[in-house]
Amino acid sequence: MKKKGFTLIELLAVIAILAIVITIALISVTRIRENALLEVVDTKKDQIEQAAILYGQENPNELTSDISNGCTNTTFTTRNEEREVEYTINFCVVKTAGDLIDGGYFDSGYLDEVEGKQDLINDVTGESMRGEEVIIYRRNNRIYSILKEKV
């Protein structure tokens, strides 16, 4: 009489295959989560730049060529129509995200409450983004902004 069931080798093979499948799934989920967090941070940086443009539109007299504003003759390179273009900024001002938050240039739906203060939190590092500096500048009678790169 033959017993029905699985041998020990068959059970171990199934367990090994399941372990491999679960490992692959966890790696994929982790990668998807990291990419989503990076997208959220990029969105928050875009919000800082949009708030800076709003600030510049409401305070155009602050965009001067005065050396004390911290950005006279700042140069940056951008891609424009598939080619790199270098710009020199003369009429500008540097503000931090904290200045823009405290000035009310953000919709409160984007902000987190941290220790009784409104703040933007970097979802990757968990740190405050209040110190992010943004250059607000005028070119061809339009207001633009760009985040300063951290060195």
Image (tube, rainbow, N blue to C red):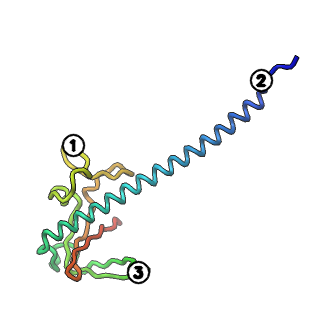
Instruction: State the residue position of label 2.
Output: 5
Identify the residue at the far right of this view: 1
- What is the three-letter code of the residue carrying label 3? Glu
Locate residue 108, reporting x and y percent. Answer: 21, 51
Instruction: Give left or right: position of 144 versus 31.
Output: left
Identify the residue at the far top of this view: 1
- Kindly indicate the quadrant of the structure image that contains residue 67: bottom left
Instruction: State the residue position of label 3.
Output: 81
Mark 2 or 1: in front is: 2
- What is the three-letter code of the residue carrying label 1? Glu
Q: Looking at the picture, tell me which residue is in the foreground, 52 or 5.
A: 5
Going from the N terminus, do you reach mark 2 or mark 3 first?
2
Instruction: State the residue position of label 1.
Output: 115
- Kindly indicate the quadrant of the structure image that contains residue 11: top right
Q: Residue at x 64, y 38 (%)?
A: 19
From what the image shows, is residue 148 above or below residue 3? Answer: below
Q: Looking at the picture, tell me which residue is in the foreground, 86 or 50.
A: 50
Q: Secondary structure at mark 3?
A: loop
Q: CA distance from mark 2 to mark 1?
A: 61 Å
Going from the N terminus, do you reach mark 1 or mark 3 first?
3
- Looking at the rendered structure, which numbered label has been put on residue 89? none
Q: Residues within 10 Å of mark 3 (few under 14, many from 20)?
A: few
Locate residue 18, reporting x and y percent. Answer: 65, 37
- Kindly indicate the quadrant of the structure image that contains residue 22: top right
Instruction: Give left or right: position of 149 versus 28.
Output: left
